[in-house]
Structures are given as C-alpha cells and as structure tokens.
Image (cartoon, coloured by chain):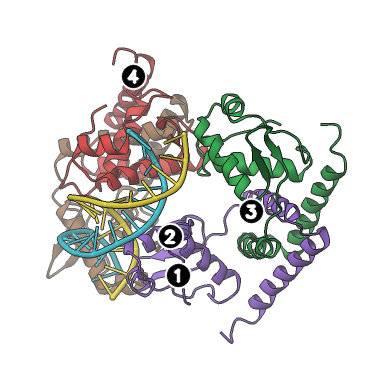
Chain colours: A red, B brown, C purple, D green, E yellow, F cyan
Amino acid sequence: MLIALNFGSDVPIYLQIRNQIVLGIAEGRLQAGERLPSIRTLSEEAGVNMMTVNKAYQLLKQEGYITIDRRSGTRVGGTGSDRSAALNRLKEELRLSFSEARLNGVSQEELLALCKRVCMELEECECSPSTS
Amino acid sequence: MLIALNFGSDVPIYLQIRNQIVLGIAEGRLQAGERLPSIRTLSEEAGVNMMTVNKAYQLLKQEGYITIDRRSGTRVGGTGSDRSAALNRLKEELRLSFSEARLNGVSQEELLALCKRVCMELEECECSPSTS
Amino acid sequence: MLIALNFGSDVPIYLQIRNQIVLGIAEGRLQAGERLPSIRTLSEEAGVNMMTVNKAYQLLKQEGYITIDRRSGTRVGGTGSDRSAALNRLKEELRLSFSEARLNGVSQEELLALCKRVCMELEECECSPSTS
Amino acid sequence: MLIALNFGSDVPIYLQIRNQIVLGIAEGRLQAGERLPSIRTLSEEAGVNMMTVNKAYQLLKQEGYITIDRRSGTRVGGTGSDRSAALNRLKEELRLSFSEARLNGVSQEELLALCKRVCMELEECECSPSTS
DNA sequence: GTGGTCTAGACCACC
DNA sequence: GTGGTCTAGACCACG
C-alpha cells in the first residue's frame, strides 16, 4: 500500500491520505481486518509529520472505515456508517460533478458510460484482490 | 437566482457561491449570455463580503464558465475549458465518490440508478429553462 | 468565562477545557449564540498551546455543543445531538458512579438527595444567567 | 464473573477491568471475601496481557476495593476509602453528566427518574446476590 | 484576525 | 512497540 502525495495540491495532505486509504479499501488493495502501517511508519514513508497521519487516521476512524485497537494498532474495517447520509452526500457530489462535466462538453452518453466503467473497475478489484 | 449559503459548513463560502452558479448554469436556471448580479448586489443579498463574491467570480472566469467585461458586467458563458482535463477530474471524483458509497452499503445497481437519475434531472432542466 | 486547568491531572487538558465549556453552557454562564474566545485568545489566557484549544473546540463542534462559523468565529449552540445515545451514556455513567459511591459508604438516601441537589443547582443557573 | 472487554474503546483496558469489578462488587455479583481469579487466569480468559490485569488489581487495591495477600490471593473487600473524597468526586461527576444530558434534551424529570431507577436496580442486586 | 494545516520534535500511557 | 497528548513555532486560506 503506497501513498502518493501531492504536496502543492490544495487538498490537505491528511485528506489525501484519507482518500487514498478509502480508495484502497474499496478497490480491495486493503482487506478487511488487514493492518494499516503504524502512524510512525507511514509518516516516515510518506515524508510527513506523525500528526498529519494521525489526523487522517482519526478521521477514518470517525467515519467508520478503520478501527484503532490498543493492542494491535490500526486495522481496516469498522462500523458501517450512516447509509442514507452517504446517499445524500453522493447525490450532491454527482449533481456538481455532472454539471461541470456537461458544461465542459461531455455528453450525457459519455457521462453514463464513464460511470459504468468506473463502477465496473471497482467491482473487479473487489472480486480479485488476492493477486495484489 | 437565489444563493443559499451554509455558513458553518467546512466548504468555503466563495466555493459554495461558485458551485451554486455552476449548478445554476448546468440546470438552465442561468442562461448563456444572461447577466449575473454585480458583486456588490450579490454580496449584499447573500450577506457576505464583496471580496468573497469577487473570489467566486474570478474563479468562475478562470474556469471558463463566465466572462467579466468592464463595460457590460458579468455574463454567463465563456471560453469552454479543457475537455479532457475535465474528464480526468470527473473520473477521479467518481472513483472516490463511488468507493465511499460502496463502503457505506450502497449497491452497484443503486449507484448506477442514481447516476442515471441525476443525469436525467439535469437534462430535463436544460430542456425547459424558459420559465425561470 | 474563566477556564481553570489542572495540569498534572490525568484528564487531558483538551478534555478539561471541553468539560468546563459544557458545564458553562449547561449552567448558563455561556449563553446560546454567545461568542467563545478565539483559539489564540483562550490558548494565551490558559497558558496552553493553540492546538490543544483547537482540539477541544473540534470535539465540542463534533458533539454539537458549538458552531464554528467562518465569518464570526466560534459560537455556543449547534445541532442537538443524539438524545437516546446520550441517555445510554448517562445510564452507564450513573451505574459506575453510584456503585463507587455505595461502596465508599454513601447511603442510597444521600445519593438521591445529592442527585436532586445537583439537578436543582443546574436549573437555577439556567433560569438566572443574566446576573453573571 | 465474566469480564466483557471492548477493545477499540477509548477507555483503557485496565480501566475497563477495574470498572467491571467495581460494578460486580456493588451489584453483589462479587461478595465480600470472595476470591478473585488470579492475574494469570483472568488475563488468559480475557485475552489480555498479565501486566494489564495486574494494573487493574493494583488500582483496585489502592482504591480500597480489594486486598491482595501473597498467601491467600486476591479477595474482595478492603479498607473502605475516604468517604468525603468519594462524595466530592461523585458530585463533580454528576454535575458533568447532568449537564451533558440536559444539553442533549433530557428533562429534569427524566434525569431524576433515571437516577432513582439506577439506584433501585443497584439495591435489588445487593439484596439477592446469593444465586450467583 | 479568524480558523486550518503542518512541522519537528517531546513525553507519557498502554500493552 | 503502539497510539495519545502536548509544545512552540510557522504558513496559508478565508472573510
């Protein structure tokens, strides 16, 4: 599990870390129950401060994506969070993303095709995570 | 064209304004060529600082959604920006949004259905904007 | 609104700050809508680091006790949080507190009398906060 | 006497053990004079480190809830600690707990009713502990 | 001037 | 070893 950071992006580093881990879980590169690197380890690997990694982990924990266990460190998987809230967020994100795309010349057909493709790629990853 | 702001949100106000205008254009509430309210007017209506509105307009101009002309004021419609860049951005946004949704218990079918629905709603707006 | 900190306590400073603000709100010393001191101000007054105060404020915000508004700083009052969760937490706290008290020789009558007294004092504060 | 631990809670494990034993004594599941499991036994049962159990026992001994005798092992019942200190602690705990509950929409009546109920449940346990 | 983010250390509690 | 907390600065985004 490599974290590629873009310093200089306007997305805060802790959010980049959080996003990559969410992607990693959804795409099966990180299995449920699998151990995440310790705060220290990841902070050294990524070249950022411990507290930045800590902030990302706390956020992921609060969102229910990971569990922080006193005994064995940090692991993937936790409490599934609020489904309907997630749906609402998703819809708003889609409205904005789609609006931008349409205004930039992306056709409705392209849009839906891309949705399907991204969705399929996600599914494939989930089904064959073992080869990672 | 009403701008509904959520102070206290973690989305900066200038971005909220920008997003609502993008949505307004995509959904046909704002027509190409239509004049946007002046910075002063909008800032008073929305109860925010003029600098904040200015920042939103500058961003929209830079993104090619509006044109700012000293003589005729600010109008909808502009250069139309980089299509392939927009597609790449869209894809990354979808990957993350879909990942979050899937991890929160949204099924693949629900996901694609929602995409279709949001897309359709957008299209309907574009087709019947005249009554605004 | 003075914050009295006990360095050397095993309760983390950020929690002490959080607790005192919760007490302050419940006892009416802090009115809904009233502005809290800025992170910088409070950190200087209390002689602690900004990030410690920040952590307390973030926690209070997450718990729905305060609102952090980009325009006007931090204010008392927010979204009422989960009532039933609060009741469950309360019950567990009471079970433990009462058990300890009983084992230390506090009679059942004393216990309930103390509950009543604390409850009354709280109510009086809420009713006459203006003289503060 | 089963100890139910919640790894992943932010309450340290040794404190969870201590709390459950205090509850056990107050609710009569653990009788005065009764022998507690050895550190080794309990640590194996609960799946935690012996040091963790030891820390809980030392704390309980220091608080006067149990006595540790090299010959006869660990037993319930001890010195009975400072009553007025216990009362003060209790009052502070109640102030904070009540404040949180009131701010989360729990009425004064509900609050006192819950106190009474918790207190009664405690008393019933103490009166009929024999069947354990 | 506000809060948000980040750094490069440090000490401590826990296991 | 782990994560939790804290410090004393700093820079930036926001309004």
Residue bearing the label numbered 4: A125
Residue C83, labelled with which disc?
A: 3
Density class for disc 4 (Cα within 10 Å; few <14, some 14-19, many ≥20) is some
Badge 1 element: strand
| Left or right of B120 in this view: C26 | right
Label 4: chain?
A
Residue drawn at (16%, 68%), measured in percent from left and top? B72
Can I make out residue C116 in this image?
yes
Give C106 or B32, whichever is nearer the viewer: C106
Can I make out residue B121 in this image?
no
Label 1: chain?
C
How far apart, in angstroms, are the residues tagged by discs 2 and 3? Answer: 24 Å
Residue C14, labelled with which disc?
A: 2
| Amino acid marked by disc 2 | Tyr
How far apart, in angstroms, are the residues tagged by discs 4 and 1? Answer: 45 Å
| Amino acid marked by disc 4 | Cys
Residue drawn at (76%, 57%), measured in percent from left and top? C105
Residue bearing the label numbered 1: C75
Residue A72: image location, x then y, percent: 42, 30
Badge 3 element: helix
